[in-house]
Amino acid sequence: MEKKTECEIVQDLLLGYVDDTLNAESKRLVEKHLVECKNCIGRLKEIKEDIKQNENNQQKEIDYLKKIRRKSKIKSILMAISIICMLCFIVYLYKVITVINFMNRAEKSLKTNNFYKETIQSLSNNQTSVMKEYYKDGKYKRVSEIYSDEGIKNNMTEYASVDSDEIISIDTNQKKATIIKGNFAKMQNQESNLKWVPFIPNRQSLYANLGTAFIMSIHTDTYQVGREYYVLKNQFEKSGHWEIWIDKETGLPIKEINREGITEFFPETEVVKEVQDMIQEYKYKFGIVTSEDVEVPDLTGYEVEYTSNEEIEKLLSE
């Protein structure tokens, strides 16, 4: 076997010299040889350039992989955002369809020429207000009663006809009748007012339906009622005090709840005696109202007073 020359030995050690892994003796040998040998100096430069080129290539690969990972991460984030947006849109679309469906059902329910509506509201002092409304063939009767431990008190009974400029208000306790005539009465006697429904007055407005779907959370329940109904809550109201129940079949409200909506104070103080929920319950029946229910009674024996539109507007402005 031929003996290696000093150049060959040094060139074998050059890589270790560049990496600084040689022992002291080998390092001195290389450095002493490099002083005298241009050929080995050239080889050293080649090795350093190769190492530098490899480092550059490795850095490019690392940068490329980082770029790929960054793009992949951005793609994953965009995909996640797209899925979330799609899910939100599906939920919103479901709510829009739900709202439009029960608004259409409400519109269809109130196209009838014969319905009875009862509104029950809890008041303070253990009293309950009951409003009974009868509608048949364009004629209307509204009975206002207060229920308490002392019995039932009839506050007022009103009679009206669609588009009429007259409202007859009867106080059966005092045997008095007030006949209101004029534009104010005519405005009140518009069919849209006589068939007004809490929460969903704009049932034919697409924009109102879209807004309702955006604002409200909607879920289905059967609790207390025994049939399916929608529970609507304002999802942007943090307190969560208000909600309304909508009958799934008729599209009409069943109950409206304002939690802690009634505050009762001790007499002549600001000290709270009781806080209770304000609850309004609605009952609808169709096809049961008779002509006698909406017929204005004989006012013989009543003290009759006529009130003009101007007097009503004056009272409202005060």
Image (cartoon, helix red, strand yellow):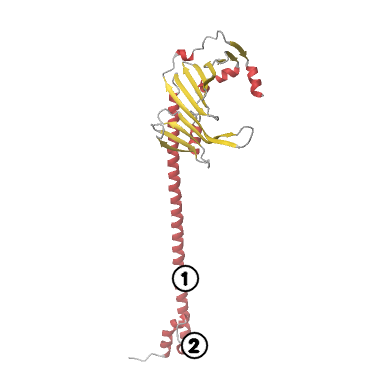
For residue 158, the mark is none
Please tell me in which quadrant of the rendered image residue 6 appears.
bottom left
Number of numbered labels in the structure image = 2
Give the residue number, with chain letter if any, for mark 1: 56
**Between marks 1 and 2, how big is the CA–CA gap?**
27 Å
At 53% from the left edge and 17% from the top edge, which residue is drawn? Answer: 157
Who is closer to the viewer here, 228 or 151?
151
Q: Is residue 49 above or below residue 131?
A: below
Residues at discs 1 and 2 in contact (Cβ within 8 Å): no
Extreme residue toward the top, this view: 300
In the shown orientation, is residue 116 left or right of residue 171? left
**Residue 58 position within the rendered picture, expressed as x and y whole percent measured from the top left:** 44, 69
Q: Residue 62 at what x, y percent from top left?
A: 45, 66
Can residue 308 be spotted in the picture? yes
Q: Quadrant of the N terminus?
A: bottom left
Residue 264 figure quarter: top right
Give neighbour class at mark 2: few <14, some 14-19, many 20+ (Cα, 10 Å). Answer: some
Name the residue type under label 1: Asn
Give the residue at the far left of this rendering: 1
Left or right side of 285 for 240 = right
* Position of residue 257 in the picture relative to residue 269 (left or right): left
Judged from the image, the secondary structure of the residue bearing numbered disc 1 is helix
Q: Residue at x 49, y 12 (%)?
A: 295
Pick the quarter of the image with the C terminus.
Answer: top right
In this rendered view, identify the residue nearer to me: 92 or 272: 272
| Residue 31, disc | 2
Sequence-earlier tag: 1 or 2: 2
Q: Residue at x 43, y 34 (%)?
A: 230
Please state which of residues 7 and 103 is positioned toward the viewer in this rendering.
103
- Give the x, y percent position of residue 176: 58, 13
Which kind of residue does numbered mark 2 sit on? Glu
Q: Secondary structure at mark 2?
A: helix
